[in-house]
Amino acid sequence: MLRVILIFGALCGCIYALDNGLARTPPMGWMAWERFRCNIDCKNDPKNCISEQLFMDMADRMVEDGYRDAGYEYVNIDDCWSSKQRDAQGRLQADPDRFPNGIKALADYVHKRGLKLGTYGDYGNLTCGGYPGSLGHLEIDAQTFADWGIDMFKMDGCYADPKTMDKGYPQMTKYLNQTGRPILFSCSWPDYQRASGIDVNYKLIAENCNMWRNYDDIQDSWDSVLGIIDYYAKEQDTLAPVQGPGSFNDPDMIIVGDFGLSYEQAKAQIAMWTIFAAPMLMSNDLRTIRPEFRELLLNKEVIAINQDPSGHFGKRVLQINGVDIWRKNLTNWDEYSVLFFNPSPYNKTVSLQLDQIGFTYMLGYMLHDVFNHRDIGHREILFPYDYQVPAKGVLLTYAYPSE
């Protein structure tokens, strides 16, 4: 039925919005960029270069180490995968040395393991890394990706005019729809318009993209994570209303297990992305990740909050003693996730009454610490209780009405 709808839309020219049934909850998976960048030196660094072997290795680790079963399903190629020239028919083609079997064979490998393959392109003349962009080739690129069995497509915006993106990105949505293959569409559209001082039409973006970048690329540092969180806090009243099943704000990759975050800071990034109901796309080396970081990424209670069917974008509702308090509404009646986020270098104690953050059930609530898998206990809504929050860290809780 979906294919019939899409074909009819292509014939009549009346369906341009995204219609793929994907990303009903925030997408989860792995992406190459932050950890492996544009490393194409397979001669001297064969284990870490952008090649089919790297993505096969990560697919294997996602299956064997439990990530797939926890919900991580996308294995995403980023920039620098293609040849510098299109083929004789104008189609993109993989670099023949680093992807000797082609992208279709890699997609087959990933699919056989119960996973999905994503790839990368650019709306401009070139990608950010200087490889062929899709400008002037949107339709043929969409069909090429579908023919290869691609499941997710990230379209960047380097070497493009941000003023034309309100037209260009919806064109790509149309061409992806026309292929008849459900391909999750990840857009960089609002990020480039924001940086250019253009007022962003988020309604249009949410109609055409499954997820979208709003702010700077994440770097492997605590300062970078803080910058993204600060931006999302300041813009929460703009970002929250446009988010929901099928359409998600994307604060960029999860860098847990890389070099820049301590254990507490890693918990903080995962917790904030969970409160945002953000895509959980890891960018790390799953072959060498330390067990304590793997355990954080596989925490089922945290993932359950991130994947709550409502898709609600949590908001910062209070600040006490230098600690930000965020509340995320969950699908079930009067259930929430409450996050205490302490960006300072000192441990903090917060005294909070639950009515201060909008809790109304007079019999009170049970609070549960989701990282430590322990009950905090019953809390009356009109009585203050103390909460301990570590330096540069978080306390992430699940709250539900007491019986």
Image (cartoon, rainbow, N blue to C red):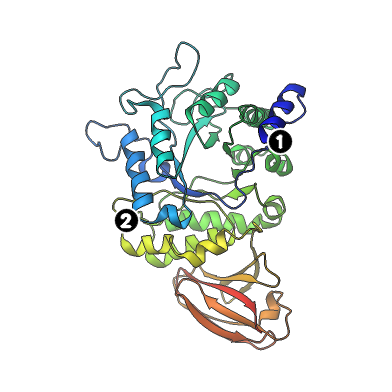
Q: Residue at x 74, y 27 (%)?
A: 8
Image quadrant in which you'd find residue 332: bottom right
Number of disc labels: 2
Query: Which mark lies nearer to you, 1 or 2?
Result: 1
Where is mark 1, residue-wise? 17
What residue appears at the point 54 percent right and 54 percent down from the top-left corner? 228
Within 10 Å of disc 1 (Cα), the crowding (few <14, some 14-19, many 20+) is: some
Judging depth in this view, the residue of 79 and 98 nearest the camera is 98
Residue that protrudes farthest toward the left in the picture = 44
Which quadrant: the C terminus? bottom right
In the picture as drawn, the residue positioned furthest to the top comes out as 88
The amino acid at mark 2 is Ile
Q: Residue furthest bottom?
A: 383
Front one among 5 and 269: 5
Q: What residue is disc 2 on? A: 289
The numbered mark, 1 or 2, whose residue comes first in the sequence reads: 1
Residue 193 numbered tag: none
Residue 401 horizontal/vertical position (percent)? 66, 79
For residue 29, side relative to residue 379 (left or right): left
Quick check: can you spot residue 255? no
Tell me if residue 61 comes above or below residue 327 in the rendering: above
Spatial CA span between label 1 and label 2: 39 Å
Which residue is pictured at 46% across the width and 75% down the height? 373
Q: SS for tag 2? A: loop
